[in-house]
Image (cartoon, rainbow, N blue to C red):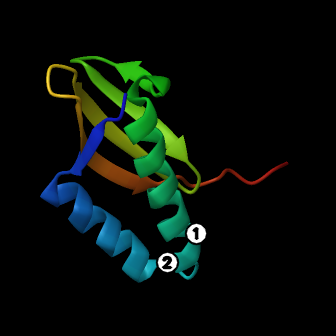
């Protein structure tokens, strides 16, 4: 089953700001594309959170989203850049 992935306007704006500020725009683009494709295949692969929300990661990005199973839709609510901790 294919799911329709919709990015809320606020999430699109967050992604645009991340892309605009990042020195590796290609990584941001690839990560967003990977998340979009992954959620379209199976949104339940993410980690569940309270209030029927989920999170998923494709470094360097993370997204929060909700699933509308009645309409086979996924709504991306927010996106952020994952800051890797330096190895000790």
The correct choice, above or below, for 60 with respect to 29 in the image is: above
Q: Secondary structure at mark 2?
A: loop
Q: Is residue 67 left or right of residue 79?
A: left
Q: Which residue is label 2 attached to? A: 22
- Viewer-nearest residue: 5 or 83: 5
Q: Residue drawn 24% across and 63% down?
A: 12
68 with respect to 59 (left or right): left
Q: Residue at x 46, y 28 (%)?
A: 46
Residue at numbered disc 1: 27
- In the rendered image, the residue lying farthest to the front is 1
Q: Quadrant location of residue 4?
A: top left
Residue 42 percent coordinates (x, y): 43, 29
Task: Name the residue at 42% across, 22% down.
Answer: 44
Q: Determine the secondary structure under disc 1.
A: helix
Instruction: Give the image location of residue 11, x and y in percent.
Output: 24, 56
The reply to whether dot 1 and dot 2 touch (C-beta < 8 Å) is yes
Counting other residues with Cα less than 10 Å from the Cα at mark 2, is it few (<14), some (14-19), or many (20 or more)? few
Q: Is residue 56 left or right of residue 78?
A: right
Q: Position of residue 54 (x, y in %)?
A: 35, 28
Q: Which mark is residue 64?
A: none
Is residue 61 or residue 43 the one in the foreground? 43
Where does the N terminus fall, quadrant-wise?
top left
Pick whichever of labels 1 and 2 is earlier in the sequence.
2
């Amino acid at each position: 089953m294919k799911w329709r992935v919709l990015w809320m306007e606020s999430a699109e704006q967050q992604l645009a700001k991340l892309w605009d500020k990042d020195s590796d725009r290609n990584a941001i683009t690839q990560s967003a594309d990977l998340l979009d494709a992954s959620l379209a295949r199976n949104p339940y692969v993410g980690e569940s959170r309270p209030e029927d929300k989920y999170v998923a990661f494709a470094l360097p990005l993370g997204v929060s989203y909700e699933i509308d199973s009645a309409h086979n839709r996924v709504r991306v609510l927010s996106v952020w850049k994952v800051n890797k901790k330096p190895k000790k």
